[in-house]
Image (spheres, rainbow, N blue to C red):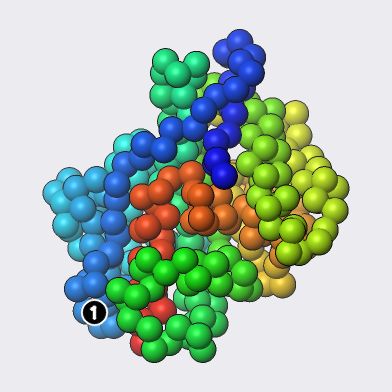
Amino acid sequence: MSSSLGFPFSHFPRFPNFSSSRTSSSRSLATAAALASASALGLSLVANSKFQTNISPLGWASLSLANASCSPVESRTGEVFPEEVDGGRRLLGVGVRRTNVLGLKSIDVYAFGVYADDSDIKKLNEKYGTASLSELKDKKEFIADALESDIRMTVRLQIVYGRLSIRSVRNAFAKSVGTRLQKFSASEPSDTDELLQKFVSLFRDDQKLPKGSVIELSREEGYVLRTRIDGEELGQIQSKLLCKSILDLYFGEDPLDKNAKQEIQLNLAGRLKIRY
């Protein structure tokens, strides 16, 4: 299945399709060695040269989320991400959503960060508590269970393209989320058209998305999807299927940024192995 999204930008002619670029910056927030020593710090993430902090441009700098001494940076866009959001959900990984215009020009649309609540991650302990980090970092079933579980998570989208319209975002979500709703509804029967319309209708034409805007998509307790733009709440929708479909965009089987998905999975496994 393709994960491509079309972005009809507000100042470009309306093209029939834009293809998604799978090229993304490679970043790693953690290694097994860092995770082994993390119990004394809460969590240390090790970054390579393409994932930077705002105090050191050098690779393999240790990043502690227990202290506000530095902030994660998505290196391709230079976007700085908070280490925690929503009362303690901590960063698992960052990535970039890119698109090609007529196959001629590649555009960075937004940088994204995926966050999770540590206490909720422990819900996976019963099944994976004895598995090693090396076993979990590539295990498809592990990510599938994370998508299915009632783990509080937030995906933070930081807009980097200055000509992005709300209409283009609505259309892109209609395509990408709609495809996933249909895929997952094969085993979870649901009126996907009505559910999709309920979600995309939250993005109203009167809303603006200048460069620097932030969209937050959060799975709250009880499989409630909470949507915000620049802190303003647009609405909440209770649907396990919708939550799963949106999170699948960022770390599912066919993600928008494959390197980000690997980073998220590695750090999710690392959080599970840490004993607080």
Can residue 80 be seen here?
A: no
Query: For the point 33% across and 53% down, which residue is it?
Result: 72
Q: Is residue 148 above or below residue 47?
A: below
The picture places residue 188, in percent across and down from the top left corner, at 76, 64
Looking at the rendered image, the quarter that the C terminus falls into is bottom left
Instruction: Label 1, secondary structure: give it.
Output: helix
Query: For the point 29% across and 47% down, which residue is it?
Result: 26
Q: Residue furthest top?
A: 13
Q: Nearer the viewer, residue 122 or 6?
A: 6
Can residue 59 be seen here?
A: yes
- Would you identify the image quadrant in which residue 4 lies? top right
Query: For the point 69% across and 32% down, which residue is it?
Result: 171
Q: Is residue 77 above or below residue 90?
A: above
Query: For the point 55% across and 40% down, which residue is it?
Result: 2
Looking at the rendered image, the quarter that the N terminus falls into is top right
- Would you identify the image quadrant in which residue 30 lies? bottom left
Q: Is residue 202 left or right of residue 161?
A: right
The picture places residue 239, in percent across and down from the top left corner, at 76, 62
The picture places residue 135, in percent across and down from the top left corner, at 34, 75
Q: Is residue 58 above or below residue 223?
A: above
Instruction: Tell me the crowding category of disc 1: few under 14, some 14 to 19, or many 20 or more residues within 10 angstroms, Cα based.
Output: some
Q: Nearer the viewer, residue 223 or 127?
A: 127
Task: Name the amino acid, label 1.
Answer: Ala
The picture places residue 241, in percent across and down from the top left corner, at 72, 60
Q: Residue furthest left?
A: 58
Q: Is residue 4 left or right of residue 177?
A: left
Q: Is residue 61 left or right of residue 270?
A: left
Which residue is label 1 attached to? Answer: 36
Q: Nearer the viewer, residue 254 or 120?
A: 254
